[in-house]
Amino acid sequence: MKEDLPLQILDSEDMHVVIGSKAIVEPQGVGERFVSKFIGWSAKKYLILHLPSHLALLEHLYNEKKLIIRYISCDGKVCGFETKVQGLIFTPQKVLFVDFPEKIVAHGIRSRKRMNVFLGGEISFNNIKYHCYILNLSSTGCKLVIEIDNHDIVTPKNGDTLYLKFILPGVSPSDYSIECYIVRIFENKKRGFNQYGVKFANSKESTLTSINDYIAHSEKYMEESCSLDN
């Protein structure tokens, strides 16, 4: 049975966004929205968002207009808040100033915490070993990337089983080998790599405990880089 993930009411310092984070902006009462991104802020005063060059909803972005802004935080939550337009600047670029929110509504989209990482690893597939990088990690799975510049490489497909080896710095023991299977593929042939969402299978309880410990310790420091209270 799928676990229900409750809504959370967070203070504004727990927004956890970074410069360039994508935002969905919806003027209230209009029924339409547009894609933007966060490009700056002054804590407790305002947020700054970039506006598209051609925006049909521009006439609805007047001072004091109420907005709903939604985004994915850098700790993996779907977040949203209500705010008001403070003003717009049209040169040299179109930017939107909005009130800094007092509260954020957040909803976890995963039943297990997932941490963005960059760890070197190795996968074994079809009796061949490939170097890989792990981009995020939880106790149930991870996202990894494999270079595919070599056209002779046989890439895994959905449902394929592979074996992943990696090291967790600062955790004892530090090296792990886990059987896993592919549940999602993100192809990017133009850039010469594929990304894979994998789920761990038959992992030892001690391995899951070590991963959770690593995530918990890393979270204390990595979330600081996402804080707007600086």
Image (tube, grey):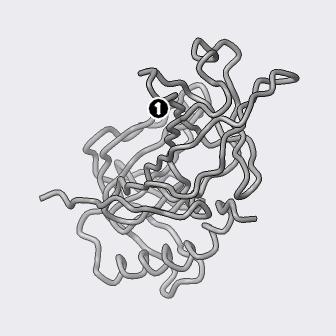
**Residue 115: x percent and y percent?**
50, 63
Q: Residue most toward the bottom? A: 172
Viewed as shown, does residue 54 lie left or right of 128? right
Q: Which amino acid, by three-letter code, is at mark 1?
A: Glu
Q: Is residue 104 left or right of residue 170?
A: left
Q: Secondary structure at mark 1?
A: strand
Q: How many marks?
A: 1
The vertical placement of 133 against 24, above or below, is: below
Question: Which residue lies at the image location 53% right of the left edge and 54% below the top edge?
Answer: 135
Residue sitting at x 59%, y 58%: 16
For label 1, count other residues whose C-alpha is less than 10 Å away and answer few (under 14), some (14-19) or many (20+): some
Say which residue label 1 marks: 187
In the image as oriented, which residue stretches furthest toward the left?
Answer: 1
Residue 67 relative to residue 93: left or right: left
How far from the left and from the top, in percent, is residue 193? 55, 37
Above or below, 98 relative to 54:
below
Residue at figure coordinates x 42%, y 57% from the top left: 142
Q: Split into 4 quadrants, where in the image is the N terminus? A: bottom left
Quarter of the image where one finds residue 91 = top right
Residue 94 in percent (x, y) is at: 76, 24
> Could you tell me which residue is drawn at 59 percent across and 25 percent down?
190
User: Image quadrant of residue 196?
Assistant: top left
Q: Residue furthest right?
A: 92
Q: Along the line of sight, which residue is nearer the eye, 114 or 173? A: 114
Looking at this view, is 112 or 51 the one in front? 51
- Say which of 122 and 52 sits in front: 52
The C terminus appears in which quarter of the rendering? bottom right
Q: Position of residue 228 (x, y in %)?
A: 68, 59
